[in-house]
Image (cartoon, grey):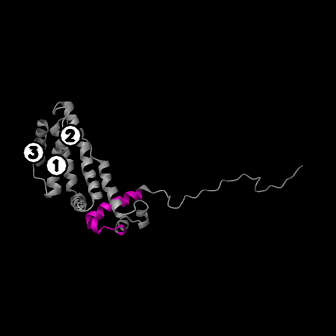
Amino acid sequence: MLFRMTTNADQPQTPPRRRAPAGAAVLREDVTEAIRAAVFEELASVGYARMSIEGIARRAGVGKTAVYRRWRSKLHLVLDVVSAVAVMGLPVPDAGSLEGDLRLLYEVTARALRHPLASQILPDLQAEAARSPEIAEAVQKALRDGQASVASGIVMAAEKRGEVRAGIDEELALDLISGPLYWRSVVIRSPKVPKGYLDALARATAQALKAL
């Protein structure tokens, strides 16, 4: 019988475990969402100028490094969070008529704009936008793109039903649809929408769109 001495070279080799490079840790989505929520709360509480990475991290229950792994500055963090609003958007109403679709849209939008966070954050960001082109661009994108997709869907549905003419000016339509409610809620910051206002607004806007 032959015997031979086994060496390490004779044994099956287990591949060495590769270490992830520094800074390449998987970013937990729940932590990212907690930070984003904290940004909105900090904006509403202290405003953009006084907001800090330390305050955001403390409110989110994480360390500052968790924030800096995801965003390199307060500005980039706010730009990302505000821009994300445009991606979420609103569902396109389907009430079966132009006036009905507008009424549903105004109801949802008015409720969102009355939310304490939105009512405090939007005016503050608009003030900051006057001093920062980057913030101005992000705010415009969040407000305009989110509404544009919904308004476009409402107009397209109205075209198919024959309620508005084909080839309607969508830019003008968006201004007519979105302008009045933002003016009341965001610009002059009216505390509440009068009874019957949304019905009247939907009716007047529908008539204006049909006249284009």
Q: Which of marks 1 and 2 is in front?
A: 2
- Dot 3, how many residues are within 10 Å of its Cα: few (below 14), some (14-19), or many (20+)? few
Q: Where is residue 54 in the image (x, y as percent from the top left)?
A: 37, 69
Pointers 3 and 2 in contact (CB under 8 A)?
Answer: no
Q: Magenta segment, principal secondary structure? A: helix
Judged left or right of residue 143, residue 10 is: right
Read off the residue under disc 2. 170
- Tag shown at residue 70: none
**Is any atom of residue 70 visible in this view?**
yes
Of badges 1 and 3, nearer the viewer stands 1
Q: Which mark is drawn over residue 179?
A: 1
Mark 1–mark 2 distance (CA, rounded to whole Å): 13 Å
Q: Considering only vertical position in the picture, is 152 above or below 42? A: above
Q: Answer with the quarter of the image where residue 72 lies.
A: bottom left
Q: Counting other residues with Cα less than 10 Å from the Cα at mark 1, is it few (<14), some (14-19), or many (20 or more)?
A: few
Describe the element under mark 1 as helix, strand or loop.
helix
Residue 62 lies within the magenta run? no
The disc labelled 1 sits on which kind of residue? Gly
**Contact (CB < 8 A) between labels 1 and 3?**
no
Measured as percent of width and height from the top left, residue 68 is found at 42, 63
For the residue pair 1 and 134, the one nearer the viewer reads as 134
**What residue is at 10 percent from the left and 42 percent from the top?**
204
CA gap between label 1 and label 3 equals 15 Å
Q: Residue tagged by mark 3?
A: 200
Hey, which quadrant is residue 167 in on the image? Answer: top left
- The stretch of residues the image draws in magenta is 30-54
N-terminal label among 3 and 2: 2
